[in-house]
Each structure stands twice: as C-alpha cells, then as structure tokens.
Amino acid sequence: MASELPAEFALIARHFRPLAGPEGLDLRDDVAVLTPPPGRDLVLTADAMVGGVHFLPDDPPDLIGRKLLRVNLSDLAAKGATPIGYLMTVSAPRDTPDAWFAGFAAGLAQDQKEYGVTLFGGDTTSTSGPISLSLTILGHVAPGQAVRRTGAQPGDGIWATGTIGDGALGLAVARGRLRDPSGHLLSRYRLPQPRLGLAIAGVASAGMDVSDGLVQDLGHLCRAGGLAAELDAALVPLSPQARLAGPEWLATCLTGGDDYELLLAVPPDHDDALRQAALVAGMAVTRIGCFRSGPPRVMVRGPDGAPMELAAGGWSHF
Amino acid sequence: MASELPAEFALIARHFRPLAGPEGLDLRDDVAVLTPPPGRDLVLTADAMVGGVHFLPDDPPDLIGRKLLRVNLSDLAAKGATPIGYLMTVSAPRDTPDAWFAGFAAGLAQDQKEYGVTLFGGDTTSTSGPISLSLTILGHVAPGQAVRRTGAQPGDGIWATGTIGDGALGLAVARGRLRDPSGHLLSRYRLPQPRLGLAIAGVASAGMDVSDGLVQDLGHLCRAGGLAAELDAALVPLSPQARLAGPEWLATCLTGGDDYELLLAVPPDHDDALRQAALVAGMAVTRIGCFRSGPPRVMVRGPDGAPMELAAGGWSHF
C-alpha cells in the first residue's frame, strides 16, 4: 500500500519521520528491518483507539498519542518485557488540521524518549469516520519467561501495583460527576503510567494489566488458570484522592477501567522477591487477595467482611 | 486495552481464535510471544484499510480480509522476506452483522493456509465510522539481505514481475468504465497476488512493490537512490486482457495502482540470477528500462519512441 503522493508524503515527512529509529529506514521504505536481540523471545501486542470511543474529538492530541503508546507499553510491562519499538497506522479525516498531527507526534516524541522506543513504520490514510489509530509494539524478554495469563496456582497471592480506581474516577470527573480539586484523578485517566521495569519474570506465576476493571480482569486470570479468586476490597490500594471521593465510589474503583496497573499472581515464597523488585523499580505493590481452587469466579469481600455484589462486571468496547 | 466483555469476547472466540497460531496464545492473553528465527533479520510492515477508501461497504468480506493480508505480504515479497505471522486490529460499527466477521475471517483463514502465516494477536473495538482495519505483518530474511528502496545504481536494469496495469483496469471495470468479459481484470483488482518466493536477496540492488502506480513507485526508487530512470513503455508487460482494452488505456496501466507486482533494480551481471530465480518461482520477470545517473526523475519513452507525458503521477490516499 504505502499510499503516498505529496500530501501524504509531506505529512509523514513533517510529523512522523522525526520519530523513526534506524529500524524504520527513515520511513522511506515500506518496511522496517530489525535485528532481534539474540537469544530473547519477542513479545508483541496491538491496540486500536478510535475517536468517540477511546478519546474525545477535543482531547489534546499529544495526550492521545501518549495514551496510545502507553496502553501498549502497559501490556508489555505486564509480561515483564522490555519495549523495543512500534508500528502505527493513522486513519484521519481529510480536514484534520495539521496542528492535530503536530500535537499527536509531539506526544509520541515525548514518550518515546521516556520509554526508550522509536517508530519503526506504519501507514497513513484518510477516512470518512473519526480518527482511527492502531499501534503494534514489540518488546523482548528472556526465553520462556514472558508472564502469561495462565499459570496462577491455588494459594498464589493476588497483587496489584500502584493504586486502583483513579482512572475510573477520572472518567467520572471528565463527565462532571465527581470533583477533583488536585487534578490527580483526571490526569490518571488521561495518561496511564505503564509499570515498566518491575522485574516480574520468574517471580509472578501469571499477570496482566488492569485496563477493563480490576474485578473483570481478575476474572480473566481465573478463567485462564481454571481457578477462583478471593479479593479483599479493604486491601485494594486506593489513592488519597480516591479515598476522599468516599465509600460510595468503591464499587467504581473495583469495576471501572483505565487503571493500567499490573495484576499479578505470586506464589507465597516469591513475596519477598516481588517486594524487592518493587523496591528496585520504585513502585508500590499490595497483596489484595488470593487464588483458590474451584470453578473460575471472583469473590469480593467488602470492607465489612461480607460478600460484595457488584453490578458492573467491567467495560467492553463492543 | 484488550477490551472484552461477553460480546467482544464471543466475537473473538467465534471468528478470530481459529486463526491464531501458537505464538498467539489462543488470543487469551494481551500479547503474542514469538521466538524469532535465530540469526535472521525481521522485516515488519503495517497497512491500514478503511471502508469507502480501500474497499466498498458491499465488497465481499472474505475478499477484504484476503486483500488486507495480501497487500502486507506483497511488501514482504518486495524485500525478499519470508512471512511469519501478523497482528490485526478491527474497528467496526456495532451493527456490523456477524456474517461479515465470519466472511472476513474465512478469507483470512484461506490465505493463511496459502501463505503459511497465522494470527498472533490484535484488538477489536467499535467505531461510529466505517470499518477500519490495520494489519502488521512480520517476516524474516538473512541478516543484512532485506532488499531496500535505496541501493539502485546507474546502469542497473528496471525489472517488473508479472503484468502491469490489470489492477487499475480492474478498478475501471468495477466503475463500469471498461468491459471485462473474462473477469481477469476485476479479479486482479480485488485480489492481489503477492510475489512471495522470488529469491531477490543478493540479486536485486533495490526493490518495492507496485501499489501506487508503476511510474510513481519508480519515482520513489529514483528519489531513494538519487538517480534517474528511463522506462520503455513498449517493454512494460501487459496481460492479453489489458492489451485488448486498447492503447488508450496504456497511461492508466502505467500510472494506476493496485498492481502488487515487484519493481526491482538489478545490476546487469545479476540478470541471469534473476531469470533463474523467476524460473524457480514460476514467475515472469521483464526488463522494462534502466537507471541512469542524474537528478531523480522518471522518463517514460512511449511505444512510438517519443517521450510520453503522463497526467496522473499516481494515487494518494490522503
């Protein structure tokens, strides 16, 4: 494809070529060429973001670019992988202002520097619909050491990084349903912090990032591992801002999405290794429950010790 | 991201899980894990296809899937790479019928078998706009042997595989502007034939696939290599069906798009090697001109020997 006449050509040269690493051949070829790190497995993941679904038309374009990159980096983080680079396709209406692309690329440039990745290649095209973005990222990990969704065992602890619920509350703030004097919740919603650098390979028996809501994503780990989970709501780490919102927002914290924290299964004899890894990475990790044998389901114990009934199971984009 | 509740979950399970290779972890994880072929370079490319731009809403969905895969396979073919697998994101309106996904996946399944690739992963999401597809494909090649756009030298021959122009004429057929009794032109437009298996590594000094029109794409090779090209229109291989359309369609053949043939620069002392490789691959290759030193431009000599003026330089999607 690589459809390029002056307009598309100039757009790529102006905004995307500066993002390219050596593998991207200056975006002058149709392909990237990568010599993979010898003796390592590659970890690959792709996510799409669509205007009106994942972001609003008037969201700052630099934040859209950074979020697109970060949700993919978060998937790598949950596998214990080190990011290498990415390919991206951008479909945008013909009347998309040049300033939008400039802002979008500036956001990507900023996070490329922060996370040590470069653009390998991609495609730009027009659309009659909303801006439609797709990003495929590559990372590497020691052979056989990628942390998978499968692998949790009965007795493994359930651990979470950082704090849970800020993203969901931030969405409530954006919708005008909650106050956020410090701006912390909104910023957590707008800009995920991928938990890269936590050395979970060989430590966690299973893992994923929390993007669709803690309870729903824990359910995925249960189904993948064929076991049940007991989650203790009182142990779930909340930010001061989330606590300030009050107990009526607890269910939102547990079932909302956009956390981009890591949800890990950790055998008890690896607790110290995880704590040590967290110390090295400068991250908080909290044990919030444990896995049990039994048919896949998530039991949530409320702050009062009684089982908690949660209406929403999580978020679906389809 | 990997947004999945029952609806999205079931959609993936029903249509896309059967396409997954072992690297795709059954599409139950957010990532794929690939052990790259040792001692090989990876070649990566991504293309987007959008409804109303690259295909029409009522195009058969299996052909859309196959075309999406094949345009990417064509990029690998032009680099001399062997395909491995792909990641894909699909954004579709919520009311997209299940039969559309079934047909789309069936087309992918058919071509996966034909070209020896599997689905590694991806994402599905909704959109308020037209169906928006993005595919990233991986291939491998001997270290340093990927055929690039840069590298053509003055005196190198310009070679093309197969026949040129059928795709552009097929589009004219689809628009009712040309008759196509045999259906050959339309099928060439709808279903590219990626020229995989032609052993061009170490044989071609530069190469790309012809997707935006022969003259425009030759211009890309000129700019990348910093040299001029002389193209002899009388030598450009046309199918019997294209010849039947008559000389008034010659310019369309030279400047239209959707050929997905390979355009190669080949040093004269590699002619025999290229012919031998073509014989092995069962493909036609034709010398259609040569590169000259000079500022980047494409000179086209018409069938009468006089310079040919071409109105359209090619196709842009933006």
Image (cartoon, coloured by chain):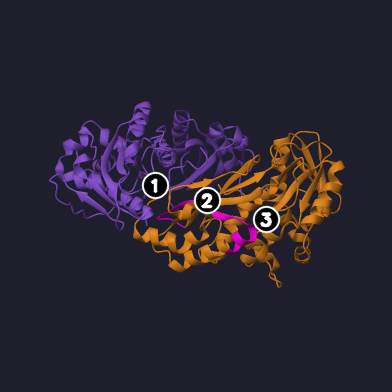
Chain colours: A orange, B purple
* Residue that label 1 marks: A1
- Mark 2 or mark 1: which comes first in sequence? 1
* Residue that label 2 marks: A23
Q: Nearer the viewer, residue B49 or A244?
A: B49
Residue that protrudes farthest toward the left in the picture = B304
Check if mark 3 and mark 2 are on a common chain: yes
**Dot 2 crowding, Cα within 10 Å, few <14, some 14–19, many 20+:** many
For the record, the magenta segment spans A110-130
Whether A212 is drawn above or below B237: the answer is below
Q: CB under 8 Å between callouts 2 and 1?
A: no
Q: Which chain hosts label 1?
A: A
* Residue that label 3 marks: A194
**Dot 3 crowding, Cα within 10 Å, few <14, some 14–19, many 20+:** many
Secondary structure under the numbered disc 1 in the rendered image: loop
Residue that protrudes farthest toward the front in the picture = B269
Q: Quadrant of residue B158?
A: top left
How far apart are the two marked residues, 3 and 1, measured between alpha carbons? 33 Å
Secondary structure under the numbered disc 2 in the rendered image: helix
Residue type (three-letter) at the residue carrying disc 2: Glu
Q: Residue at x 41, y 35 (%)?
A: B62
Of circles 2 and 1, the one toward us is: 2
Residue type (three-letter) at the residue carrying disc 1: Met
